[in-house]
Image (cartoon, coloured by chain):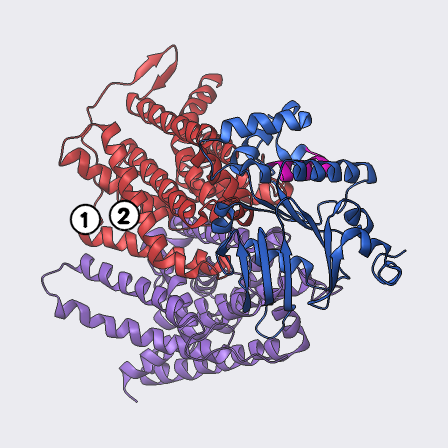
Amino acid sequence: MIETILQLAANGIMSGAVLAVAAIGFTMMFAVLRFPNFSLAGHMAGGAYAGWIANTMFGLPLPLALLCGFLVAGGIGVASDFIVLRPLRRAAPITLAIASVAISLFIENALRFGFGNDLRSFDLPLARDWVIGWLRLGPQQVQNAGLAIVAMLILFVIFTFTQTGRAMRATADNAGLAAVKGIDTEKITRLVSFLGMGLAGAAGVLLGADTSIEPLLGLKVILSVFAAAVLGGLGSIPGAVLGAFAIGIVEEASQIVVPATYKGAVGFVAILLVLSFRPSGFLGRRQT
Amino acid sequence: MDSYLIAMVTLAAIYAMMAISLNLSWGLAGMVNLGLAGFISIGAYASGLLTTVLGWPVPLAILAAMIIGLVSGVALTYVTLRLRDDYLAIVTLGFAEVIRLAIVNELWLTHGSDGISGIPGIVAREYGYGFELGTLALALAAVALCYWLADRVRTSPYGRNLRAIRDDPEGTAVAGKNVTLIKVKTFGLSTAIAALAGAFYAHYTSFISPEIFQPLLTMYVFLALTMGGTGNNRGAMLGAFLLIFVLEASRFIAPSLPQFSAVQHAAIREMLVAVLFILTLLYRPQGISPETRHR
Amino acid sequence: MVLIVRDLVAGYGAADEILKGVSLSVGAGEIVSIIGPNGAGKSTCLKVIAGLLAPRRGSVTFKGHEIAGLPARRTAALGLAYVAQENNVFPSLSIQENLAIGGYLNPSTRRRRSDEIMGQFPLLRERRRDAARALSGGQRQTLAVAMALMSEPALLVLDEPSAGLSPVAAETLFETIVAIKAAGVSVLMIEQNALDALAISDRAYILVLGQNRQDGPAADLANDPEIRTIFLGG
């Protein structure tokens, strides 16, 4: 029993690390743009396909494919922000949220048009599971989690030690004041869209490397991503990371009691519980 | 009347119910429901199962479907009421996904992705043309009822409070009013209507499966309402007819682009829906028939 | 003159005009106060000067540049530092980071200024790693002013700096403002405590219903019996 629990916890930490990358993207965009950007799902899939092309057609190794996924999804993010969301900046947050659903629908179907609905997989070396004591770890999962953690560390450095990172956090705190201090908040918004959607794309590549990719790849995990962000407190980056690990572990652990097919529902239940008992999340401040 | 025309108008009437439902929650109260497809499928499956498995009479099953729709809507809003509207968006989206998962996985009840077939019509199918016309008449009557209900809500003092809540989420304009109760009641009514639309769909087409109630359906209804005019029940109905027109017109994509596969045709169609929705938001956000402001 | 405002007309909605032709000026090294009853348009006037609200008519000339209608970050780049009445610090950033953002437009002098300012305000140095959220009201105002000074502005525009502060904290803040003037920075401010404001000001303007009512040396206004009864509650 204890072995099973530890094994599930290890799996949960590995999948949580990948979730965290997407959840950071979601929550940082929420912090600056003040609406839940549902097109994260489409951007995840877009990034995953970019990484897949880089890997299977150009033979690039996973870390470089990851970078391609990041750059392409970030680029799509800036484009969709510029074309659709920027003209709606003054509209109600809910209007923006719904527009973002349409963006996702467009990206997913553009992918479907280009690549069909078939599952595709990355060209990665197959390796035997590592066995440490009674713990079994898939080398690919470990590598994915490692890459996710590296991505998070890079982001942490940007946010903490660079003036641009500080400017992003300042804009999230109070955009009006940031403008008074000379920050070009529109530029920061574009940068946040690039980084946020880029992270979504990177997470898409990691998810694809774990299993396979399809146009609805993002939609399938989006609830877990939202749950992670809500759990940690919308807008809080450390919160999103904690939330993602928690959701990853709980999703794995839930398999003890419910069939694995209901994994997607775990996030929803977590959201409901958090909203009922601690709406501001682990690390969030009170939102009304 | 031509059978094709009857079918299109019946379908438009069903979409009109969905659009009125969305208008009640989103248009009038500013409560977004991104899980509309979930509530529609609840209605469809409740009514479909009650008639096929338990042999309930159709009207009773539809009524039960509406009650289930109402209860689930109330339960869901209750959790998110104290919070910003973004949370309701996330929660309703999640709700629809969980309902979809349940329908796909609970094979013993729903037959999973095979769906449920042989759902009886509201008017017996044996009547042929009589079934078609009868269903159309009933659907139009149901739309009229929904419209009457929704418009009473809109023009009553209660509706004024709703708009005040929508336009001033801080709640200063409605100080002293029971905002919570107003919101819960409105959302419950709207999800009951969504369930009604779902039940109608099930009894009309006789077959339902999880494929039909994808998030795309929610998007269709948003498109209908936005094109017609958010906040305006007449706009909602108008938008439903426009939507059917757009969807039917998009059938010509396939013959005119034969070099693409069926999957690609479907993809083009959905991209068109997305683009049309975004263009409406950007260039005609008030819709064709804008909300008339009366204070 | 560092700042010359002429015949400013401005408002928020389409219909209402809050400012109906306000004129004022601030000279080099001067402290100038704007006083007047609620609804006189004092805050609106400062917002237009800072570039947060575009005026309908009138001109704002800062160091010889016409700045009316320029966005806030452009007026900031010219050396005009505006401190709002509230929400004037970044709560989740540390004090050190707040100061760094204060010097956002002056990357080359940022480090030096930060050291100088922390020397001037030992409290900020002591708590430089704390989040601004953790500061008391008076400390927060001090930080807001310190942030504004990071950019070595020619003019500091303060909207009710002492609002909500204890008398002791307000007095400390006024001392700070006097010290800022001594360093050669001009100050334009609105104050609730009109008498305290006049005590440290060189000149003052009285606004009523969006129009100039009276102006002159602060000491004269403070001693004018009519003004004392109507505006200064004395």
Q: Colour of chain C?
A: blue
Q: Give the residue at the far left of this rendering.
A: B259
The three-letter code of the residue at mark 1 reads Phe
Whether residue B147 is visible: yes
Residue C144 among those drawn in magenta: yes
Cα distance, mark 2 to mark 1? 8 Å
The residue to which callout 1 is attached is A115
> Residue B13, percent across and down?
41, 77
Kindly identify which chain the residue marked by label 1 belongs to: A
How many labels were placed on the picture? 2
The image's mark for residue B189 is none
Please tell me which residue is depicted at 74% across the width and 36% down the height of the picture.
C175
> Residue A156, percent across and down?
44, 29
First to last magenta residue range: C135-146
Marks 2,1: beta carbons within 8 A: yes
Q: Colour of chain A?
A: red
Q: Nearer the viewer, residue C40 or B23?
A: C40
Against A117, residue C112 (above or below) is: above
> Residue B214, percent across and down?
37, 57
Output the letter for the chain in purple. B
Q: Which comes before the other along the chain, label 2 or label 1?
A: 1
Q: Main secondary structure of the magenta part?
A: helix
Q: Please state if A268 lies on the left or on the right of A39 as rendered.
A: right
The residue to which callout 2 is attached is A215
